[in-house]
Amino acid sequence: MSNTLIRAIKCTITRLGGQNEGKTALGESKSPKGYREGVEYGKKVALRTVAKYFNKYLTCDIKGVTNKVKEKKLKEFLELIEGV
């Protein structure tokens, strides 16, 4: 191979992706989110959506005869929705 061709190949290899001189987008950025962080974020978004629907359109009632367990679960649900 000629020296010109080798220099051209080296030049194109160093310029791939635009991460050349002075650019640190990949070097010192924060770590990417993993699977678990994405799942947690999805849960938060879903809770926000459900809370919005309950505030605008829905009501929450206890079916049948009330007892301590049903009242406790209703209270937990309302706290979950209000905590978003």
Image: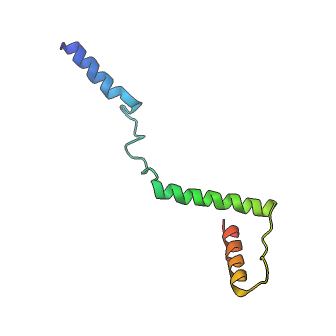
Picture residue at 63% right of the left edge, 57% below the top: 45
**Position of residue 69 measured from the top left corner of the image (x, y, whole percent):** 68, 84
**Position of residue 47 measured from the top left corner of the image (x, y, whole percent):** 65, 62
**Position of residue 84 measured from the top left corner of the image (x, y, whole percent):** 66, 65
| Residue at the extreme bottom of the image, as rendered | 68
Q: Is residue 6 left or right of residue 57?
A: left
Picture residue at 40% right of the left edge, 36% below the top: 23
Q: How many marks are shown on the rendered structure? A: 0
Placement of 16 over or under 73, stated as above or below: above
Location of residue 82 by image quarter: bottom right
Placement of 61 over or under 69, stated as above or below: above
Residue situated in front as seen by the camera: 10 or 83: 83
Colour setup of the view: rainbow
Q: Is residue 13 left or right of residue 59?
A: left
Residue situated in front as seen by the camera: 53 or 83: 53
Placement of 46 over or under 72, stated as above or below: above
Picture residue at 79% right of the left edge, 83% below the top: 65
**Position of residue 53 measured from the top left corner of the image (x, y, whole percent):** 76, 59
Location of residue 51 by image quarter: bottom right
Q: Is residue 35 left or right of residue 52?
A: left
| Residue at the extreme front of the image, as rendered | 64
Residue situated in front as seen by the camera: 21 or 51: 51
Placement of 67 over or under 43, stated as above or below: below
Residue situated in front as seen by the camera: 74 or 13: 74
Image quadrant for the N terminus?
Answer: top left
Picture residue at 23% right of the left edge, 13% below the top: 4
